[in-house]
Image (cartoon, helix red, strand yellow):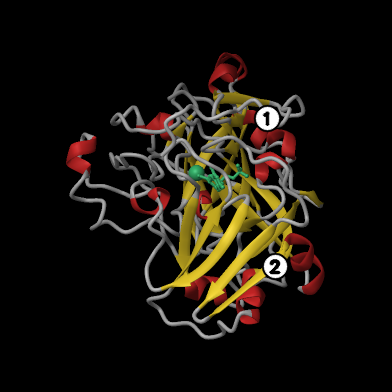
């Protein structure tokens, strides 16, 4: 770890964003919750940014990515990855595992950036498939105990570089849709979102989608990075400080796929008074689940959970993919009865978003029902 403070003076300009800054250095920002549900595909202006260090500079198409699989090591420039491999597109929800940590804080204090409920967005990415690149270094069949570790070029506050890993079976899965992406929403990646190349792992927590990619290594163990081993883990509820967490880090698995989630985005807390006056409102929100599981139902209650009404869902499916990686936006017209509006999603596997006082030390999604006036 560096002893001198990291230099953020070369971070990109950010005037194009319409985001609430949660932390300045490193830059962490999310949109206003009502803005999040205005578009099915989140424009960059409203896309959250999660960084752990200064944004790397002077990278371009000649940046080299090292790929190591078994005996073979190959180097590819970003330019070569663009031209030598077929280009694929994926539409997916990117969600930080810290999304809704502010709600979690009402249950128990945790460590990490205090996100609201908008550390999530739904964008399209384009790039080559990680699968094809691994094939090019001779990694074609998977064993369950192998992992693909990614490292980035940037220096983080916590460690010399950002790193993470995913199981090799996810990386090689023909329908896993893991990309080495160079475009977001049809344009070259911006510096904040990982220019010139990032991994995108659909259905997994955002932490696995490593930006500013430097190396890819197939190995017999998970990434030893701080971000795989000491963060993004669900610790038991009795753990209340760093010292108590110590014995759990090596026992508790790293989170991969995220769980089922939904939130009432509009009306927002600030808009509550307007609702009270008019009585009838249209509630709007998002719902999503990990692992390619789509949303089958969103229930909404206006009477403190006594009764539930089924929301109208918008979740286009792509016929080219075996999975649903995108989010679901929902709406429902209902009456305001003086209680907070709450939503509860059910994913395609029948997993129900439930309320329990889950505490995640730093990172797991708080799965409690969302209210407009927490
Ligand atoms: N190199 C690098 N990759 C990274 C991160 C980072 O700080 N550095 N943050 C991760 C986390 S925790 C999340 S949620 C996503 C956020 O992606 P975004 O900033 O493009 O929205 O990037 C992931 N990849
Ligand atoms: Mo994250």
Q: Residue at x 34, y 42 (%)?
A: 355
Q: Where is residue 150 in the image (x, y as percent from the top left)?
A: 52, 60
Q: Can you say whether 307 is above or below 149 in the image?
A: above
For this view, does 324 lie left or right of residue 84?
Answer: left
Q: Residues within 10 Å of mark 2 (few under 14, many from 20)?
A: some
Q: Position of residue 334 (x, y in %)?
A: 58, 33
* Pick the front one: 283 or 66: 66
For this view, does 119 lie left or right of residue 76?
Answer: left
Cα distance in 3D space between marks 2 and 1: 26 Å
Q: Quadrant of ligand 1?
A: top right
Locate the N terminus by quadrant: top left
Q: Residue at x 43, y 62 (%)?
A: 350
* Pick the front one: 259 or 356: 259
Q: Which mark is residue 76?
A: 2
Locate the C terminus by quadrant: top left
Residue 261 visible, this orientation? yes
Q: Residue 272 carries which label?
A: none
Q: Residue at x 48, y 53 (%)?
A: 163
Q: What residue is disc 1 on?
A: 10
């Amino acid at each position: 770890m560096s002893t001198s403070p990291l230099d953020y003076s070369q971070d990109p300009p950010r005037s194009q964003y319409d985001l609430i800054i949660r932390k300045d250095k490193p830059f962490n920002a999310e949109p206003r919750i009502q803005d999040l549900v205005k578009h099915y595909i989140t424009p960059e202006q409203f896309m959250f940014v999660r960084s752990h260090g200064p944004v790397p500079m002077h990278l371009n198409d000649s940046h080299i990515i090292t790929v190591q699989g078994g005996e073979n090591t190959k180097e590819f420039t970003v330019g070569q990855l663009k031209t030598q491999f077929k280009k694929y597109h994926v539409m997916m929800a990117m969600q930080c595992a810290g999304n809704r940590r502010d709600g979690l804080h009402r249950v128990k204090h945790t460590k990490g950036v205090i996100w609201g409920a908008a550390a999530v967005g739904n964008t399209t990415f384009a790039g080559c498939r990680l699968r094809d690149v691994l094939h090019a270094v001779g990694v074609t069949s998977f064993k369950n105990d192998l992992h693909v570790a990614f490292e980035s070029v940037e220096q983080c506050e916590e460690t010399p570089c950002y790193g993470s890993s995913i199981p090799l079976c996810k990386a090689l899965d023909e329908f896993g849709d893991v990309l080495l992406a160079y475009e977001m929403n049809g344009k070259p990646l911006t510096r904040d979102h990982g220019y010139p190349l990032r991994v995108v792992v659909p259905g997994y927590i955002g932490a696995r989608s490593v930006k500013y990619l430097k190396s890819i290594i197939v190995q017999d163990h998970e990434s030893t990075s701080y971000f795989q081993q000491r963060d993004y883990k669900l610790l038991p509820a009795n753990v209340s400080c760093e010292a108590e967490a110590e014995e759990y880090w090596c026992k508790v698995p790293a989170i991969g796929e995220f769980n089922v989630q939904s939130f009432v985005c509009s009306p927002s807390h600030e808009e509550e008074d307007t609702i009270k006056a008019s009585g009838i409102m249209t509630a709007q929100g998002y719902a999503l689940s990990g692992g390619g599981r789509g949303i089958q139902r969103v229930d909404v209650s206006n009477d403190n959970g006594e009764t539930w009404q089924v929301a109208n869902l918008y979740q286009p499916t792509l016929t080219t993919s075996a999975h649903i990686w995108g989010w679901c936006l929902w709406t429902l017209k209902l009456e305001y009865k003086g209680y907070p509006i709450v939503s509860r999603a059910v994913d395609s596997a029948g997993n129900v978003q439930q309320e329990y006082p889950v505490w995640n030390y730093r990172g797991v999604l708080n799965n409690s029902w969302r209210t407009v006036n927490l």
